[in-house]
Every structure is written in C-alpha cells, then in structure tokens.
Image (cartoon, helix red, strand yellow):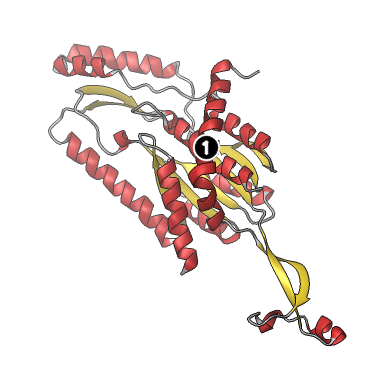
Amino acid sequence: MLSQELLAQVRRLQVITRRQVASVMGGAYLSVFRGRGMEFDEVRPYVPGDDVRSIDWNVTARTGEPHVKRYVEEREMTIMLVVDVSSSLEFGSGQKSKREAAAEVAAMLAMAASANGDKTGLVMFHGQAEQFIPPRKGEKHALRVIREVLAPEASLAKSMALPAAAGQAAAANARQSSWWRRLWAALVARRRHAPASRGTDIAAALEFCRRVLPRKTVMFVISDFFDEDYLQVLAHANQKHDVVGVWLTDPREQTMPALGLLALQDAESGQVALVDTAGADFASTYAAGAAAARARLIDAWRARGIDLFEVSAGASVVDPLLRFFRQRAQRRRR
C-alpha cells in the first residue's frame, strides 16, 4: 500500500505537471515529436497547387480526372523513460535531491505524452535494469510511472557525510592525532554496518531496452551519468532509437564550501575519505576537477551527435525542458 506521503507527492506532481503541460509544455512537446511517419487517409480530386508526386495514377486513369492521395501524420509515439535510481541520485544540497528532480522530469514527460495520446514506458536501473513497465497510453498509466519513480527504496544507501557542524568541529581539532584515529575507527565501524551502495551501469540498462523494445522510441535517459564505458552502447542505441540524455546535477558537485574537515563517502563505490575542505588548494582543485569532468561529458555526447541537456536539482525542471524542445524544434525547421 502507498504511504500517505507518497500519495501526496504523486498528487502534487499531477497537479503541477498537468498545469504546465496545459499552459506551456504541450505545444513545445507536439512540435518536436511528430510520430513515426505518414499514413494514407483518402483520395481526393486534384486542385492547383497540389504536389504532382502525390497523384494517384490508378484512380486518375479510372475516373478520367486527376486525383491525389492524401496522407496524415501518424502521431502516436512511444516515450521511454530510462531512469537512474542509483545511490548518487539521493544527493541534494538544497530542498530537492537529484532523485526528486528525476521524478519531476519523468512526470512532465509522462503527462505531456499522455495529453498527446502517446505511450509512456519506464525502465529503472542502477547496476542493472531493476524494473520495467511496458509502454501504454493514458493518464492513469502516466501516474503509475510517476509513482514508481517517486517510490522510496529501503535498500538504497544513505549518505555518510558528516553534518556541517561536525566538520567545523573537526577542523578545530584536526591537529590532534588521537582524535583522527578515533574518527577513522568510527568510520570503519560504520562502514561495516552500512547498506551496500548501488553503482550505475548505463550500458546494461540500454542493452535491456534493446532487447525489449522492438520499435523505435524516443528514449530519455535520466541520470547523473556517474559511469564509464557506456558511450559505445549509447551510440548503438541511438542508431535504433531517438536517445536524449537528461543530465541531473547539483550545485555542490561543482563547488564545495569551506566547512573544515569532513568525512565523505562515495555513494556508488562506498569508499570513505577524510577531506579538509578548508585546505589552501582544496577549492581550486575541486572546481577544476569538476569542470574537467563536465567538459568531458558534454564533448563525448556532442561527438556522437546525441542530445544532452542539464537539469539542476537546485532549480526548476520546466525551463531546461522547454529550452530543449525549442532548440530541437529550430533544428527541425532548418
């Protein structure tokens, strides 16, 4: 049974996304995703200005009057949401975690697809594909997708970062070697009893999608992309499907405030380290490393011609979605 808190979150997202889709998202979505092709509708008499290539010569010969074939766009699309639920998505330095931002993006896309009569499916993954919901139509199905992305998982590892106050106290006592030994011993003991961390395997999720999705879909891969060795599989997936990357970030992944000595755990590998965030070179080294990793990710996706746009957990998800839709619509008109 769903908890009252989860039901409240689903209802809140339903209200917000329905309003956004009705006011600003619907037209942008429709202008970008147009369906798989054209299907025959009817034959009608030729009128000046019609494309001569659409003339139906069999009907024209039979009636003695020129007729043309009329086609309409096959609008139905399948939107596949491939959502990362690894441990790193639980991080959030503000009021919202990357996991919650992922849920909002998924909700927006699912509701927009539902409003336009498209199908929506869901794959949730970390080290492998954890859950698969086959694509279907309707708002009820879209709400199920939203609920599944929002649903808490008890097995996800909790963050082991010490509170800021503890970090500041540690900075004042950093020179006391006995204190360091006591802190490290406590961290090791805590690590032994901590839940197993969940890493990210994007390649495995994409390979799963290749097996279960026989037709072309618009595949939104929603992740923070803390993974390696998935780019070749990603390029292969984009040859069959229309792959779009939704890159989830948090402001603290680019800069770190000087809070003194902190004990930090990598959410995905489980490794623990003591870090002096007030050190002379820490801020510049941290920012330079983050900027370099950011540039590598953007360049790798761009080199393969695959769309990637960023959604920050510290801001609204609507603006980057609309920006992506508008940029893609402009490319289609060229």
Task: Say which residue appears at 28% left-offset and 43% top-offset.
Answer: 290
Q: Residue at x 50, y 46 (%)?
A: 25
| Image location (x, y in percent) of residue 114 | 63, 43
What residue appears at the point 52 percent right and 27 percent down from the top-left corner? Answer: 12
150 versus 177 height, above or below:
below
Q: Quadrant of residue 270?
A: top left
Q: How many numbered marks does the figure carry?
A: 1
* Residue for badge 1: 19
**Residue 305 visible somewhere in the drawing:** no
Instruction: Name the kind of residue labelled 1 in the image.
Output: Arg
| Relative to 219, residue 186 above or below | above
In front: 7, or 45?
45
10 Å crowding of disc 1: few (<14), some (14-19), many (20+)? some
Question: Residue 93 location, x and y as percent?
Answer: 33, 28
Question: Depth check: 28 or 270 in front?
Answer: 28
Location of residue 76 with respect to 67 vertically, above or below:
above
Judged left or right of residue 50, residue 154 is left
The N terminus lies in quadrant: top right
Q: Is residue 126 left or right of residue 228?
A: right
Residue 279: image location, x then y, percent = 15, 30
- Residue 241, image x, y percentages: 59, 56
**182 lies above or below 122:** above
Question: Left or right of 153: which side holds 139?
Answer: right
Residue 191 in view in this figure: yes
